Amino acid sequence: MIIIRPIRESDYQVLSDIARESGPGFTSLPENPDLLRRKIERTCDALAAEPCLDGSQGYLFVAEDTDSGEVVGTCGIETAVGLNEPWYHYRIGTAVHASRELNVYNAFRTLDLCNDYTGCAEVCTLYLKPDYRQGSNGRLLSKSRFMFMAEFPERFAERVIAEMRGYSDDQGRSPFWDGLGRHFFSMEYSEADYLTGSGNKVFIAELMPKHSIYLHLLPEAAQEVIGQVHRNTEPARRMLESEGFRFEGYIDIFDAGPTVATRLHDIRSVRDSRYVKARIGAEPPDGDGLFLVSNTKLADFRCTVAPLRPESSSVQIDQRLADALQVNGGEPLRIVPLKARQSS
Ligand SMILES: NC(=[NH2+])NCCC[C@H](N)C(=O)O
């Protein structure tokens, strides 16, 4: 069984392995020991503290295989971004240049550097080891965050964003970076990405173009990938959309990947999840379908996926599941169907 729980100090080595394994392009986990240690500490601090929306708090979780004890993935939530340092996007806009006299009308798409998502919560840092990319593991890892947010909404800003990895080709080249960023930064994409991930973002303010960029002046290859996700990120994008996240015309400043956004209480797993009391039974009843199921604890938060047959106010689970979720009979669980109901 795969169970999601908050990260702890003893997970440092695995997190460091994941940072190496995930490679460049995985902005939020750079191979930087101090930084990784600080991320773990930050989670422990946040779990021990009252909610605070000044941007200082953030959470990392890990996916643990309960059979082997092995950590096989990680995911994170930022409580409010951009409050200690600017948070950057390009906003896609429109500029119309028209002359009635000359009978000329041109509408151009433009990009402007902005900080419009300042103060939003962010779901981030999702990585699952390749051997575990099967079944419902990916969905569990991602959606467990919504179960945590549903339980502790006061810990997060009401608007929630997710920045999706943008298009790059099989050699890892980003046509958007080559067509735009490279001219201003005079470095490789991987280096710029590493610098941002390491928390050194001053160079962005120093080097980014300050004026509107007219899209039609960019190379075709760069224009074409605006708002496109990396091939491996397609499933993640569909999943977030099924939870209610939408593209609002904001893209990443380096690779033009889309940012999707919604309100915390509009996220399907938050809105549709409900409490039931755990009833411990010998045999797990044959479930109607797969459910996300979590306990309601903060520092001991646990979440997994299981086939359940919930009743209106209780659900029967077996001892193994109760142990994994760290609940006793009679204690509350939060449940929601794993998948959005298909609209007919
Ligand atoms: N792919 C990237 N590293 N983009 C850099 C910016 C990321 C993020 N929006 C920030 O302001 O920190």
Image: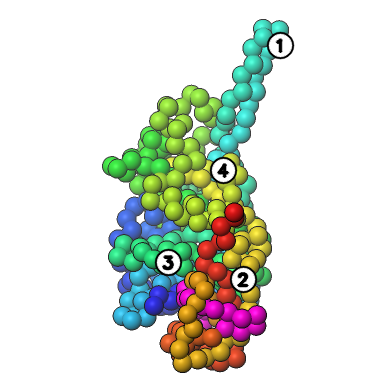
Horizontally, is 77 left or right of 73 in the view? Answer: right
Q: Which residues are magenta?
A: 296-315
Percent position of residue 310, x then y: 58, 79
Q: Residue furthest right?
A: 100
**Mark closer to the chain start, 4 or 2:** 4
Q: Are marks 3 and 1 in contact (CB under 8 Å)?
A: no
Q: Are marks 4 and 1 in contact (CB under 8 Å)?
A: no
Q: What amino acid is at disc 3? A: Ser
- Tag nearer the camera, 4 or 3: 3
Alpha-carbon distance for marks 3 and 1?
Answer: 58 Å
- Tag nearer the camera, 4 or 2: 2
Q: Which mark is residue 100?
A: 1
- Provide the secondary structure element on which disc 2 rests: loop
Alpha-carbon distance for marks 2 and 1?
Answer: 56 Å
Q: Please tell me whether residue 64 is drawn above or below residue 109 in the rendered image.
A: below
| Residue beneath disc 3 | 136
**Mark closer to the chain start, 4 or 1:** 1
- Provide the secondary structure element on which disc 4 rests: strand
Alpha-carbon distance for marks 4 and 1?
Answer: 32 Å
Identify the residue at image location x=33%, y=40%.
169
Q: How is the image coloured?
A: rainbow
Q: What amino acid is at disc 4? A: Tyr
In-front residue for pair 270/339: 339
Percent position of residue 101, x then y: 71, 7
Horizontally, is 319 left or right of 69 in the view? Answer: right
Within-10-Å neighbours for mark 4: few <14, some 14–19, many 20+ = many
| Residue beneath disc 2 | 273
Alpha-carbon distance for marks 4 and 2?
Answer: 29 Å
Q: Please tell me whether residue 155 is drawn above or below residue 163 in the rendered image.
A: below
